[in-house]
Protein backbone atom coordinates (compact mmCIF):
# COMPACT_ATOMS: atom_id res chain seq x y z
CA UNK A 1 0.00 0.00 0.00
CA UNK A 2 1.40 3.41 -0.97
CA UNK A 3 2.41 5.68 1.86
CA UNK A 4 0.09 8.61 2.31
CA UNK A 5 1.74 11.94 1.59
CA UNK A 6 0.87 14.86 3.83
CA UNK A 7 1.05 18.53 3.06
CA UNK A 8 3.07 20.82 5.34
CA UNK A 9 -0.16 22.00 6.96
CA UNK A 10 -1.36 18.43 7.54
CA UNK A 11 1.99 17.50 9.08
CA UNK A 12 1.77 20.45 11.48
CA UNK A 13 -1.72 19.35 12.52
CA UNK A 14 -0.59 15.75 13.03
CA UNK A 15 2.37 16.94 15.09
CA UNK A 16 0.04 18.94 17.33
CA UNK A 17 -2.17 15.88 17.80
CA UNK A 18 0.94 13.82 18.63
CA UNK A 19 1.91 16.40 21.26
CA UNK A 20 -1.49 15.95 22.91
CA UNK A 21 -1.11 12.16 22.85
CA UNK A 22 2.39 12.41 24.36
CA UNK A 23 1.08 14.66 27.13
CA UNK A 24 -1.63 12.14 28.01
CA UNK A 25 0.85 9.23 27.97
CA UNK A 26 3.27 11.09 30.26
CA UNK A 27 0.45 11.99 32.65
CA UNK A 28 -0.60 8.35 32.92
CA UNK A 29 3.01 7.29 33.57
CA UNK A 30 3.39 9.95 36.26
CA UNK A 31 0.19 8.72 37.88
CA UNK A 32 1.50 5.17 38.11
CA UNK A 33 4.72 6.39 39.75
CA UNK A 34 2.93 8.72 42.21
CA UNK A 35 -0.13 6.75 43.31
CA UNK A 36 -0.56 8.77 46.50
CA UNK A 37 -1.11 11.95 44.51
CA UNK A 38 -3.26 10.46 41.78
CA UNK A 39 -6.64 10.73 43.49
CA UNK A 40 -6.52 14.52 43.50
CA UNK A 41 -5.95 14.79 39.77
CA UNK A 42 -7.78 11.73 38.45
CA UNK A 43 -10.72 13.78 37.20
CA UNK A 44 -8.43 16.15 35.33
CA UNK A 45 -6.66 13.16 33.80
CA UNK A 46 -9.91 11.68 32.51
CA UNK A 47 -10.87 15.08 31.14
CA UNK A 48 -7.53 15.28 29.29
CA UNK A 49 -8.03 11.85 27.74
CA UNK A 50 -11.62 12.59 26.82
CA UNK A 51 -10.57 15.89 25.25
CA UNK A 52 -7.90 14.17 23.18
CA UNK A 53 -10.35 11.54 21.92
CA UNK A 54 -12.92 14.22 21.14
CA UNK A 55 -10.38 16.34 19.24
CA UNK A 56 -9.11 13.48 17.06
CA UNK A 57 -12.62 12.13 16.46
CA UNK A 58 -13.93 15.57 15.52
CA UNK A 59 -10.98 16.17 13.17
CA UNK A 60 -11.49 12.84 11.42
CA UNK A 61 -15.22 13.39 11.04
CA UNK A 62 -14.70 16.92 9.76
CA UNK A 63 -12.24 15.75 7.10
CA UNK A 64 -14.63 13.03 5.92
CA UNK A 65 -17.57 15.43 5.89
CA UNK A 66 -15.56 18.04 3.99
CA UNK A 67 -14.25 15.66 1.34
CA UNK A 68 -17.73 14.19 0.83
CA UNK A 69 -19.25 17.65 0.31
CA UNK A 70 -16.48 18.54 -2.14
CA UNK A 71 -16.98 15.27 -4.01
CA UNK A 72 -20.72 15.93 -4.40
CA UNK A 73 -20.06 19.44 -5.71
CA UNK A 74 -17.51 18.23 -8.26
CA UNK A 75 -19.96 15.55 -9.40
CA UNK A 76 -22.35 18.35 -10.33
CA UNK A 77 -19.61 20.29 -12.12
CA UNK A 78 -18.37 17.31 -14.18
CA UNK A 79 -21.75 15.64 -14.63
CA UNK A 80 -22.44 14.12 -18.03
CA UNK A 81 -25.55 12.08 -18.81
CA UNK A 82 -25.04 8.53 -20.01
CA UNK A 83 -25.60 7.84 -23.68
CA UNK A 84 -29.33 7.96 -24.41
CA UNK A 85 -30.07 9.41 -20.95
CA UNK A 86 -31.80 12.76 -20.47
CA UNK A 87 -29.62 15.28 -18.65
CA UNK A 88 -30.57 16.43 -15.16
CA UNK A 89 -30.03 19.98 -16.34
CA UNK A 90 -31.80 21.80 -19.14
CA UNK A 91 -28.64 23.69 -20.13
CA UNK A 92 -24.94 23.81 -19.28
CA UNK A 93 -25.57 27.20 -17.71
CA UNK A 94 -28.03 25.63 -15.29
CA UNK A 95 -25.50 22.92 -14.44
CA UNK A 96 -22.70 25.40 -13.72
CA UNK A 97 -25.05 27.54 -11.65
CA UNK A 98 -25.91 24.46 -9.55
CA UNK A 99 -22.21 23.66 -9.15
CA UNK A 100 -21.43 27.27 -8.25
CA UNK A 101 -24.07 27.19 -5.51
CA UNK A 102 -22.62 23.96 -4.06
CA UNK A 103 -19.03 25.23 -4.08
CA UNK A 104 -20.09 28.51 -2.46
CA UNK A 105 -21.87 26.59 0.32
CA UNK A 106 -18.65 24.69 1.01
CA UNK A 107 -16.62 27.90 1.04
CA UNK A 108 -18.92 29.40 3.66
CA UNK A 109 -19.52 26.20 5.64
CA UNK A 110 -17.84 24.41 8.55
CA UNK A 111 -15.35 22.42 6.48
CA UNK A 112 -11.59 21.99 6.44
CA UNK A 113 -9.56 24.91 5.10
CA UNK A 114 -8.04 22.68 2.42
CA UNK A 115 -11.45 21.75 1.01
CA UNK A 116 -12.77 25.30 1.32
CA UNK A 117 -9.82 26.60 -0.69
CA UNK A 118 -10.29 23.98 -3.41
CA UNK A 119 -14.00 24.79 -3.52
CA UNK A 120 -13.16 28.49 -3.86
CA UNK A 121 -10.99 27.70 -6.88
CA UNK A 122 -13.94 25.93 -8.49
CA UNK A 123 -16.12 28.94 -7.74
CA UNK A 124 -13.79 30.87 -10.03
CA UNK A 125 -13.91 28.14 -12.69
CA UNK A 126 -17.72 28.18 -12.56
CA UNK A 127 -17.71 31.94 -13.06
CA UNK A 128 -15.52 31.45 -16.13
CA UNK A 129 -17.93 28.89 -17.54
CA UNK A 130 -20.77 31.30 -16.84
CA UNK A 131 -18.93 33.98 -18.85
CA UNK A 132 -18.15 36.17 -15.86
CA UNK A 133 -14.36 36.71 -16.03
CA UNK A 134 -14.49 39.71 -13.70
CA UNK A 135 -15.77 37.65 -10.76
CA UNK A 136 -13.52 34.75 -11.74
CA UNK A 137 -10.44 36.98 -11.55
CA UNK A 138 -11.39 38.25 -8.08
CA UNK A 139 -11.80 34.70 -6.80
CA UNK A 140 -8.60 33.40 -8.38
CA UNK A 141 -6.61 36.30 -6.90
CA UNK A 142 -7.95 35.52 -3.42
CA UNK A 143 -7.18 31.81 -3.72
CA UNK A 144 -3.75 32.45 -5.25
CA UNK A 145 -2.76 34.59 -2.26
CA UNK A 146 -3.82 31.88 0.22
CA UNK A 147 -2.95 28.64 -1.56
CA UNK A 148 0.20 26.57 -1.19
CA UNK A 149 1.72 24.39 -3.87
CA UNK A 150 0.64 22.32 -5.71
CA UNK A 151 -2.83 23.99 -5.66
CA UNK A 152 -1.22 27.37 -6.30
CA UNK A 153 -0.09 26.18 -9.76
CA UNK A 154 -3.51 25.59 -11.44
CA UNK A 155 -4.90 28.67 -9.72
CA UNK A 156 -2.01 30.78 -11.01
CA UNK A 157 -2.42 29.43 -14.53
CA UNK A 158 -6.16 30.14 -14.47
CA UNK A 159 -5.51 33.65 -13.17
CA UNK A 160 -2.88 34.22 -15.86
CA UNK A 161 -5.29 33.16 -18.61
CA UNK A 162 -7.98 35.54 -17.35
CA UNK A 163 -5.50 38.43 -17.15
CA UNK A 164 -4.24 37.77 -20.69
CA UNK A 165 -7.81 37.76 -21.99
CA UNK A 166 -8.56 41.04 -20.23
CA UNK A 167 -5.35 42.66 -21.50
CA UNK A 168 -3.50 42.73 -18.15
CA UNK A 169 -0.31 41.41 -19.72
CA UNK A 170 2.14 42.88 -17.21
CA UNK A 171 0.25 41.40 -14.24
CA UNK A 172 -0.01 38.06 -16.07
CA UNK A 173 3.78 37.98 -16.44
CA UNK A 174 4.14 38.66 -12.70
CA UNK A 175 1.96 35.67 -11.83
CA UNK A 176 3.87 33.37 -14.20
CA UNK A 177 7.20 34.57 -12.79
CA UNK A 178 6.03 33.78 -9.27
CA UNK A 179 5.11 30.25 -10.35
CA UNK A 180 8.45 29.80 -12.10
CA UNK A 181 10.36 30.51 -8.88
CA UNK A 182 9.32 27.10 -7.53
CA UNK A 183 11.14 23.87 -8.32
CA UNK A 184 9.57 21.15 -10.45
CA UNK A 185 8.56 19.11 -7.40
CA UNK A 186 6.18 21.80 -6.15
CA UNK A 187 5.47 23.14 -9.61
CA UNK A 188 5.72 20.34 -12.21
CA UNK A 189 4.52 22.32 -15.24
CA UNK A 190 7.31 24.87 -15.60
CA UNK A 191 7.67 23.97 -19.28
CA UNK A 192 4.06 24.95 -19.91
CA UNK A 193 4.45 28.15 -17.87
CA UNK A 194 7.52 29.17 -19.85
CA UNK A 195 5.57 28.62 -23.08
CA UNK A 196 2.75 30.73 -21.68
CA UNK A 197 5.21 33.47 -20.74
CA UNK A 198 6.73 33.48 -24.24
CA UNK A 199 3.29 33.96 -25.79
CA UNK A 200 2.55 36.88 -23.48
CA UNK A 201 5.89 38.46 -24.37
CA UNK A 202 5.02 38.16 -28.07
CA UNK A 203 1.76 40.02 -27.36
CA UNK A 204 3.86 42.72 -25.67
CA UNK A 205 6.10 42.91 -28.74
CA UNK A 206 9.14 41.54 -26.88
CA UNK A 207 10.08 39.06 -29.59
CA UNK A 208 13.76 38.58 -28.72
CA UNK A 209 12.98 37.78 -25.08
CA UNK A 210 10.22 35.40 -26.21
CA UNK A 211 12.71 33.55 -28.44
CA UNK A 212 15.14 33.21 -25.52
CA UNK A 213 12.46 31.53 -23.44
CA UNK A 214 11.44 29.24 -26.30
CA UNK A 215 15.07 28.16 -26.64
CA UNK A 216 15.15 27.53 -22.89
CA UNK A 217 12.16 25.18 -23.16
CA UNK A 218 13.75 23.28 -26.05
CA UNK A 219 17.07 22.86 -24.19
CA UNK A 220 15.80 22.27 -20.63
CA UNK A 221 12.75 20.13 -21.45
CA UNK A 222 13.66 18.19 -24.63
CA UNK A 223 11.24 15.32 -23.87
CA UNK A 224 8.30 17.60 -23.11
CA UNK A 225 5.44 17.93 -25.61
CA UNK A 226 5.72 21.67 -25.00
CA UNK A 227 9.21 21.57 -26.51
CA UNK A 228 7.54 20.68 -29.81
CA UNK A 229 5.11 23.57 -29.34
CA UNK A 230 8.06 25.84 -28.54
CA UNK A 231 9.74 24.94 -31.83
CA UNK A 232 6.56 25.77 -33.74
CA UNK A 233 6.16 29.05 -31.87
CA UNK A 234 9.74 29.96 -32.65
CA UNK A 235 9.17 29.34 -36.37
CA UNK A 236 5.99 31.45 -36.29
CA UNK A 237 7.69 34.51 -34.80
CA UNK A 238 10.96 34.27 -36.77
Image: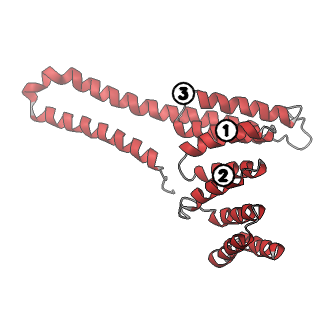
Which of disc 1 and disc 3 is earlier in sequence? Answer: 3
**Vertical order, 26 against 233 (above or below):** above
Q: Residue at x 45, y 33 (%)?
A: 59
Cβ–Cβ under 8 Å for marks 2 and 3: no
Q: On residue 138, which mark appears?
A: 1
Callout 2 crowding tier (Cα within 10 Å): few <14, some 14–19, many ≥20:
some
Residue 17's quadrant in the figure? top left
Which residue is label 3 attached to?
Answer: 110
Q: Residues within 10 Å of mark 1 (few under 14, many from 20)?
A: few
x, y percent for residue 197: 69, 62
Residue 218, image x, y percentages: 68, 77
State the residue position of label 2.
Answer: 171
From the viewer's side, name the closer residue of 116 and 134. Answer: 134
Query: Eyeballing the image, is 87 above or below 228?
Result: above
Q: How far apart are marks 2 and 1 (CA)?
A: 14 Å
Quarter of the view holding residue 180:
bottom right
Nearer the camera: disc 3 or disc 1: 1
What number of labels is visible?
A: 3
Can you tell which of label 2 and label 3 is closer to the viewer? 2
What residue occupies the far front of the structure in this picture? 205
Frontmost residue, 163 versus 80: 163
Q: Residue at x 73, y 48 (%)?
A: 162
Which numbered disc, 2 or 1, marks the residue that appears first in the sequence? 1
Residue 93, image quadrant: top right
Distance, label 3 to label 1, CA atoms, is 23 Å
Where disc 2 sits, the SS reads: helix
Amino acid sequence: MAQKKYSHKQMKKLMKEDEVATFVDRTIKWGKENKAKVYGIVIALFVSIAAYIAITSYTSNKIEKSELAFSKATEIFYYKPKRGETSKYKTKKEQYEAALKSFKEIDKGNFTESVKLRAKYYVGVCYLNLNNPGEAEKVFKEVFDKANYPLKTPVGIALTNVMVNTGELGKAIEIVDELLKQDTIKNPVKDYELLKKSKILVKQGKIDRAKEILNQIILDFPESPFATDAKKEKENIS
